[in-house]
Image (cartoon, rainbow, N blue to C red):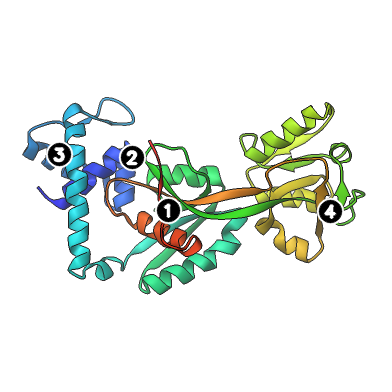
Amino acid sequence: MEIKQLEAFLAVASLGSFNAAANRLRITQPAISARIRYLETELGVALFDRAVRPVRLTGHGYRVLDYAERMVDMASEMAAIAGDQGKSAVRRVSIGLPSAIARDWAPKMVSLLRAEWPEMAIEFRIDRSPILRDMLNDGAIDMALLIGPVVDPGVRCLPLCRYEQVWIAHSASPLTARTTIAELSAHPVITYSKKSFAFVEIENALRLNGIRNYQLSSSDSSEAILSIVKEGLGVGFVLRPAAETDIASETVRVLTVSDLKIESHVAYYAAYKHDGTRSLGMSVAELASWTQTAPRTAEAVVVG
């Protein structure tokens, strides 16, 4: 029985897919299958039900799970004590950043990682949050910065930071800097997706104020929202980091909606898929979270 076989077992158990596990461990799917097959042969039992999708642990698999986690954790601790951790850190990490905060967090992550692991290669995947979330679950990236906590099975989250959301309008908009919800509703409004907290709260506020004739649109992209606002085609509600450059250049201006009570900040978390090992994603998430939430007492939010 080898540690690599146990790592493969834990990765498949966590991700529910041999292909996703292969992506996570950066090996081929046949290699993952071979490791699981050798482990099952050695133990004399089937560990996974392969007839369903996603694949599920059998009863024997569940009984083995706890032992496998402990054995892999002990091996990781032994390697760290023996001084091998620095060598194993010379590798590549893939980090997902939402486009809205990429400008703020890309240089921060480079600075943090180079200080801790100078020889590590860094790959950023900049995309919309729903896509990054899928990539994290599929094992295509090691860690992602997401609004959370993320409620996906097997995902762990560490608190990272909070960002302000602001109302913005074109600099030539007839709306005054301090406006009302009734005045705002006379203009097309655009914010994040229909499932976002911002969209739901704005829609509820409009209805509670008896406003029925309004145009509330949505987009997963901060850039798309900003483009619409900068063309004078509507009022936006976005994360401030996404709009900071345009606010500073006075292309857009910030509005205060005096009679609209809505949570103006969103919490971001460093999210990683936990497969029972001290993964690279876990180490990077801890580093980012500890730097932002000192002293080092942050605990992961566990879902599933």
Packing grade of label 4 (10 A; few <14, some 14-19, many >=20) is many
Mark earlier in primary sequence (2, 1): 2
Mark earlier in primary sequence (2, 4): 2
- The residue at 18%/44% (across/down) is 68
Q: Is residue 197 above or below residue 58?
A: below
Q: Position of residue 122 (x, y in %)?
A: 42, 65
Mark earlier in primary sequence (4, 1): 1
Amino acid carrying label 1: it is: Met
Question: Which of 19 and 287 lies nearest the eye of the viewer?
Answer: 287
The residue wearing badge 1 is 143
Amino acid carrying label 3: it is: Arg
Q: Which mark is residue 170?
A: 4
Q: Position of residue 81 (x, y in %)?
A: 19, 67
Secondary structure at badge 1 equals strand
Amino acid carrying label 4: it is: His
Q: Is residue 47 visible?
A: no
Amino acid carrying label 2: it is: Leu
Packing grade of label 1 (10 A; few <14, some 14-19, many >=20) is many
